[in-house]
Amino acid sequence: MLGAVPHSQILWIASHGVLHHLDPGAVLSAKDKQVQGLHVVLEGHLAIHVDQGAGRKKIMEWRGGDVTGLMPYSRLVGPPGDVVAEEPTEVVTVYRDSIQDMIRECHELTAILVHVMIDRARYFTSSYLHDEKLVSLGKLAAGLAHELNNPVSAIARSACVLSAHRARADGLARALGSSGLTPEQMIAVEKVRDSCLTGSAQLVLSPLDQEEREDSIARWLKKNSADTAAAEALSETDVTFDILNHLAASVKGPALNAALAWIAADSVTHRLTSEIQVAASRVHDIVAAVKGFTEMDRATVPEPVDIAKGLANTLVVLRAKAKARSVELSMNVEKDLRFVTGFGGELNQVWANLIDNALDAVSEGGRVEVTAGHEGNAVVIRVTDNGPGVSAEIRDRIFDPFFTTKPVGKGTGLGLDIVRRLILRHNGQIELQSEPGRTQFCVTLPVAGPS
């Protein structure tokens, strides 16, 4: 790497640097401690290990001829992880207090090291963005599994009951067909059946009211010499006693019992089918929301982005977490919210990080509110929670890479840094306002096209 550097500047490093011999496992630069200076690897193997919540991970390494550590004009204080010798290694270190002299006396060397610093920053940014996307994908998968569990379980349960119920319903239909009803009597039967299949008033009954309705229908069935086993199914429909009395006036004896048994069975079939349909629609809606959240079918060039739709899809993904923590999660979006220009998937990652952090910040039974509206020629999105707030001591560091207030292993400190980078990429800005009981992240993005 330093082959193009003039020999005199190589000699300058040799005369001002200090040689270190590192055994395997020795730490050259420790996390959260100040980097000593510029390190030139003469021979051996160094690697940096970062704990991103799932154990130590090697993210970069250097061998003989490479340089690492503090570069000219760099603001680096401490590395994001431990820099460890993987094998016996020799390193020459130019300490911090000599870096300014090196910049002044070694121009070609300084220019090369500045390019090394830029490449290193680009690599770290790309690596951490990728890792943060994987974290978001994990949260998405967990939320998706939880959201799909209820409707899928409902489908499986209703389908199983429907399969077992089918044979009995077929037998009751045959029994009704052999009862010898006249066309007028069949019209009366179908009228009762139709009243059972329309409406949904039973859904608003309390358990006590539902039990009372079932008992009343059972008494009516017993009074009319019909099997009371149909009472439960009939009580879950909107059938009225007037319609039942009209049927009893037209159909008598065993034929009435066969008609009522068939109507009850048909009502159960209709209810189970409706449950499957509703649950399947819910699955479809969830999958559509997840597809919209990930922007799976979008191009890789900036395009108009529907912020309202992105926020709605994000809330679908995170609703399971809010329910699990009994947190009230609400959204209020201004009507006809204008589009912004950018990448929908990246902006959805911003909303996911901000809302997920807010859910983590509040206690059980807390509240998180998401709002979006116009302010001038910009769209402003606010994520507000009623958690304890961000203390003044750390407020200025909240967007720093690797800074996190979460317990060890629970956060990488990358989320808000990635959020800030993605918003800057969209020519926007993000601000934090916080006090006990109210924390708000405010994102401002320019609208797409002319105002």
Image (cartoon, rainbow, N blue to C red):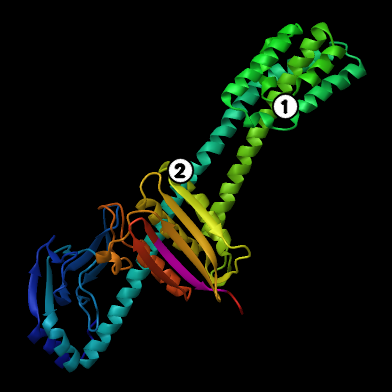
Magenta segment, prevailing SS (helix, strand or loop): strand
Span highlighted in magenta in the image: 440-447
Note whether 308 is above or below 138 in the view shown. below
- Left or right of residue 26: residue 316: right
The quadrant the N terminus occupies is: bottom left
Residue 83 position, x and y percent, is 19, 65
Residue 192 image label = none
Q: Residue at x 51, y 63 (%)?
A: 345
- Left or right of residue 170: residue 310: left
First reached walking from the N terminus: tag 2 or tag 1 = 1
Mark 1 belongs to which amino acid?
Asp
Which residue is under mark 2? 323
Which residue is under mark 1? 238
Note whether 161 is above or below 343 in the view shown. above
Q: Is residue 227 magenta?
A: no
Residue 85 figure quarter: bottom left
Q: Residue at x 35, y 63 (%)?
A: 434
Number of labels in the image equals 2
For label 1, the SS is loop
- Left or right of residue 41: residue 259: right
The residue carrying pointer 1 sits among few (fewer than 14), some (14 to 19) or many (20 or more) residues within 10 Å by Cα, namely some
Q: Residue at x 46, y 68 (%)?
A: 443
Q: Nearer the viewer, residue 292 or 185?
A: 185
Q: Residue at x 33, y 57 (%)?
A: 436
The residue carrying pointer 2 sits among few (fewer than 14), some (14 to 19) or many (20 or more) residues within 10 Å by Cα, namely few
The quadrant the C terminus occupies is: bottom right
User: Which mark is in front, 2 or 1?
Assistant: 1
The answer to whether residue 76 of the structure is visible from this angle is yes
Mark 2 belongs to which amino acid?
Lys
For label 2, the SS is helix
